[in-house]
Image (spheres, rainbow, N blue to C red):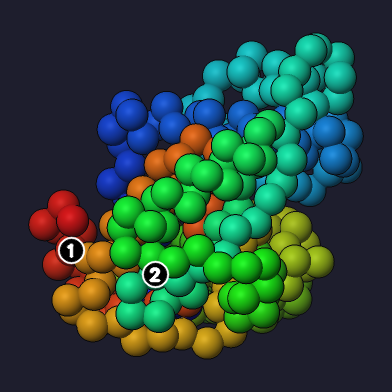
């Protein structure tokens, strides 16, 4: 699992502040609306919508907010049209960044993303400059205190997962996009609950980052993620666990 995935897990444990929760609500409402527009409002028939709704329920988004977002996507309620766009560039240390956004004003969002890249030591590049370094995957993060490795491994691999990785606190199941829902169903049948399940982009190779560059890379990613239109930032860095934990505990 890339260093960015590990950092995302650390942040997931810390993200209980009201401001962070508010941003998460806003981003998920955009995702739910877009998923419903693209694939319909039936949660069972629309895997992207189902994943977004599960994520919304996991952070206790009210059911009426979810329902309104779906209806805006299907056209039952008036709403904003969001376009999915990707931005590419580099962070300090040569780390590749792929930024996914949902926006109703591409020109504004492009300017905002470029400003953050420039301000925090990165460089925004042309389309295609780093996208080839990432592959779409599903990722399911499971608290290892809630289950055992054999159960996770057996269920995940039987349903078509690519890999099951583990660290001191979690099991991380990595799946092909087309097997993501099947793996989730199989894990659920085996009695396995997960903390986080999402479709993501995983780097095909990683760039080692020095301890001095690590705070700069993470700050750039953090500021990109704070933009309202940005849904996810994917990175190909490799930062040692002890450095990530040190940065996390220091509040960096």
Which label number is shown at residue 91? 2
Residue at 26% over, 65% down: 216
Q: Position of residue 181 (x, y in %)?
A: 75, 58
Front position among marks 1 and 2: 2
What is the quadrant of residue 55 in the picture?
Answer: top right
Q: Nearer the viewer, residue 153 or 138?
A: 138
193 lies left or right of 207: right
188 lies left or right of 120: right
Badge 2 marks a residue whose secondary structure is strand
Residue at 41% over, 57% down: 117
Q: Nearer the viewer, residue 93 or 135?
A: 93
Badge 1 marks a residue whose secondary structure is helix
As drawn, 23 above or below 194 = above
What is the quadrant of residue 200 in the picture?
Answer: bottom right
Q: Position of residue 60 (x, y in %)?
A: 49, 28
The residue indicated by pointer 1 is: 247
As drawn, 134 above or below 56 = below
């Amino acid at each position: 699992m890339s260093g960015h995935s590990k950092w995302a897990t650390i942040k997931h444990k810390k993200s209980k502040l009201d401001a962070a929760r508010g941003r998460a609500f806003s981003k998920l409402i955009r995702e739910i609306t877009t998923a419903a527009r693209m694939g319909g409002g039936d949660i069972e028939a629309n895997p992207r919508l189902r994943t977004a709704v599960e994520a919304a329920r996991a952070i206790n988004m009210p059911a009426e907010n979810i329902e309104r977002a779906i209806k805006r996507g299907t056209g039952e309620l008036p709403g904003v049209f969001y376009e999915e766009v990707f931005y590419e560039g580099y962070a300090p240390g040569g780390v590749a960044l792929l930024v996914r956004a949902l926006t109703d004003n591409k020109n504004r969002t492009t300017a905002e993303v470029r400003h953050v890249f420039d301000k925090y030591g990165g460089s925004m590049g042309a389309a295609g400059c780093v996208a080839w370094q990432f592959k779409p995957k599903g990722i399911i993060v499971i608290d290892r205190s809630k289950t055992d490795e054999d159960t996770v491994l057996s269920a995940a691999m039987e349903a078509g997962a690519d890999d099951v990785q583990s660290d001191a606190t979690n099991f991380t199941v990595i799946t092909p996009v087309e097997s993501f829902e099947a793996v989730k169903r199989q894990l659920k049948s085996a009695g396995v609950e997960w903390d986080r399940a999402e479709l993501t982009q995983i780097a095909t190779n990683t760039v080692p980052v020095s301890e001095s560059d690590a705070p700069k890379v993470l700050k750039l990613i953090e500021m990109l993620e704070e933009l309202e239109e940005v849904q996810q930032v994917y990175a190909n860095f490799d930062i040692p666990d002890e450095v990530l934990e040190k940065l996390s505990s220091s509040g960096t």
